[in-house]
Amino acid sequence: MIGALGLIVAIPAVIRHRQQIDIAVVRRLVIGSLLGVPVGIALMTYVPTTIVLRTLAGFLILYDSYNRYQLHRHHVQQQHLQSHHWDYLAGIISGVMGSAYNSHGVPVVIYGTLKKWPVASLRGIL
């Protein structure tokens, strides 16, 4: 139910930002996501929730620390992760997190930030 509601809410953003959406990126993210869904279901079934949540929390704390460090340095960096193969990995992680905890957007936002996507493109892709 929550997933269907999220899809309905996303439709206006897709319509609004359709010119900035890179279909090839979306295709790679979706393929990766489809591969990650069974892993997410297995994760939810076999791994204790506290372990998964603590791992996710640790990752988010590390990512936040990295971003704060970059802001403190006032250094504009080049685009990270230039290979398109990273799209599949981001999709897999998104599929895992989406199927297990309905939080598929977090990996895509982090990935889009590392790729330096424009805000309009990121909103449309999400």
Image (tube, grey):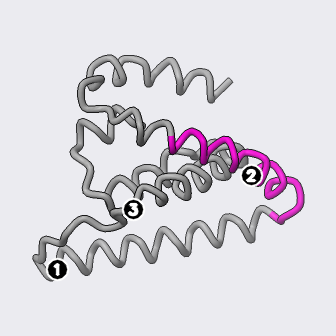
Q: Which residue is under mark 2?
A: 40
Q: Which one is earlier in the sequence, the residue at label 2 or at label 3?
A: 2
Where's residue 66, x and y in %? 34, 77
Q: Which residue is under mark 1?
A: 72
- Seen as rendered, the residue at the extreme right is 46
Which segment is the magenta one?
28-48
Residue 111, relative to residue 17: is it above or below? below
| Secondary structure state at the residue bearing disc 3 | loop
Q: Amino acid at mark 1?
A: His
**Any magenta on residue 38?**
yes
Query: Disc 2 or disc 1, which is closer to the eye?
Result: 2
Residue 126, relative to residue 81: is it above or below? above
Find residue 77 and report its image quarter.
bottom left
Principal secondary structure, stretch drawn in magenta = helix
Rounded to the nearest angstrom, the CA distance separating label 3 from label 1 is 27 Å
Q: Amino acid at mark 2?
A: Gly
Apparent side of residue 52 relative to residue 79 in the rendered image (left or right): right
Residue 83, relative to residue 7: is it above or below? below
Q: Which residue is under mark 3?
A: 83
**Viewer-nearest residue: 92 or 48:** 92
Query: Disc 2 or disc 3, which is closer to the eye?
Result: 3
